[in-house]
Image: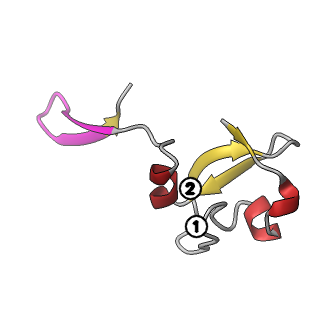
Amino acid sequence: MLTFDPGHLTSAQRDGDACVVCHKKWPRPRVRVGRLPSSAYVLACHECAETLDLVAPVRQGRTRAGQAIARLAE
């Protein structure tokens, strides 16, 4: 996990209200991509997290009832 310098982030990025990479506020970023020195998480939008190559690939699967599901590859 990456460690980010809070001095280079906006208050919205430090609080998890904006993407740590692109500053986008809506939809709210949901992917944990790193931490601050205080151990607080910093978040990124899904597109930026993919760019950072920190999102686990998604694989398709099926439930016992045959319903298609997506789950993170392990």
In the image: residue 24, left or right of residue 10? left
Which residue is farthest top? 74
Dividing the image into 4 quarters, which one contains the C terminus?
top left
**Residue depicted at x 83% and y 51%:** 5
**Residue depicted at x 53% and y 60%:** 45
In the image: residue 51, left or right of residue 28? left
Residue at which label 2 appears: 30
**Residue depicted at x 47% and y 53%:** 51
Determine if the magenta segment contains residue 61.
yes
What range of the chain is rendered magenta? 58-70
**Residue depicted at x 61% and y 46%:** 32
Q: Check the image and report above or below for 23 versus 1.
A: below
Which amino acid type is marked by label 2? Arg
Classify mark 2: helix, strand or loop.
loop
Dividing the image into 4 quarters, which one contains the N terminus?
top right
Between 59 and 51, the one nearer to me in the picture: 51
**Residue 28's disc number:** 1
**Residue 61's disc number:** none
In the image: residue 19, left or right of residue 66? right
Task: State the image coordinates of residue 47 (x, y, percent, origin top left).
Answer: 45, 60
